[in-house]
Amino acid sequence: MGTTREERLVAAFVDLADILTEDFDIMEFLHRLADHAVALLDLADCGAMLIGAQGHVVQATASGESARRLELSQIELEQGPCWDCVQSGAPVLDTFLDSDATRRRWPDFTPLALAQGFSGIVALPMRLRGQTVGALNLFHRHSRAMPFVDLRLAQALADAAAIAILTQRTLHDQRLVTEQLQTALDSRIVIEQAKGALAARTGLSMDEAFDRLRRHARHRRQRLTALALEVIQNPAEQLAGPSP
């Protein structure tokens, strides 16, 4: 007994929400998104385009090779439904490739899409609260308007993807800040240990030991933390000699 569309839809949303992993791969995520869209919406193919924090397109992929080439062509040509969608944040609905209006709008892209056997394209933004992170490109081999319920479903998939992508970016930024803070803390601990070791070996005060560390690091054009590690690891190191 086959699964219903509703069951497959639930499975798709659960899959797209599964982003809390250390090895999260954005390209693999976009592939899954495109595959779910094809299966749920009976598409010929589906592409996805992703933009970075500065608004530049950073990733593009598709469920099939023909659509993948067209996604990359849109980036190269800077024209096409998915390109327009990520630039404006607005959907591009029911674009029929054999129409004169479409040929005029995208004179270089349209012949490429027709040559791949596609007849209609819809592009929907991946967005959350007005922030667009990419677009979903739905490819058809017929020139019929998409049913409203299918458009709603496709936009829901795109919105779910946007939530997942933005959540993953936030988690990545938080991990980066945490790593930077930990690095700073570790460096400070190493420097404090080196100050103590140098003071014990030379009879200098802690302030004098720190001053000697800084002067020698500057003279050697060496990071202070790296020099501090040398002092800790070499019990005979006193940074002796005339002040640099």
Image (cartoon, rainbow, N blue to C red):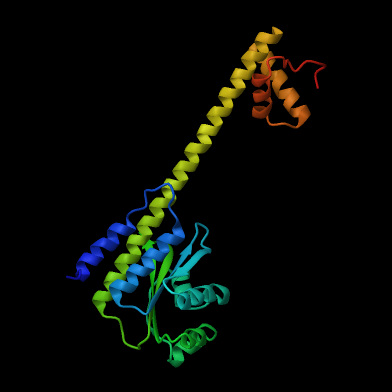
Left or right placement of residue 241 versus residue 200 in this view: right
Task: Report the number of numbered marks.
Answer: 0
Q: Residue at x 44, y 51 (%)?
A: 169
Q: Residue at x 26, y 80 (%)?
A: 147
Kindly give the residue lying farthest to the left in the view shown: 1
Kindly give the residue lying farthest to the top in the view shown: 203
Name the image quarter holding the N terminus.
bottom left
Task: Tell me the quarter of the picture where residue 234 sits.
Answer: top right
Task: Tell me the quarter of the picture where residue 88 sits.
Answer: bottom left
Q: Residue at x 28, y 57 (%)?
A: 14
Name the image quarter holding the C terminus.
top right
Left or right placement of residue 46 versus residue 54 in this view: left
Q: Is residue 243 above or below residue 125?
A: above
Residue 217, image x, y percentages: 73, 27
Q: Residue at x 30, y 81 (%)?
A: 146
Task: Tell me the quarter of the picture where residue 140 sits.
Answer: bottom left
Residue 166, image x, y percentages: 40, 54
Q: Is residue 14 above or below residue 232?
A: below
Residue 76, image x, y percentages: 57, 74
Residue 30, image x, y percentages: 41, 63
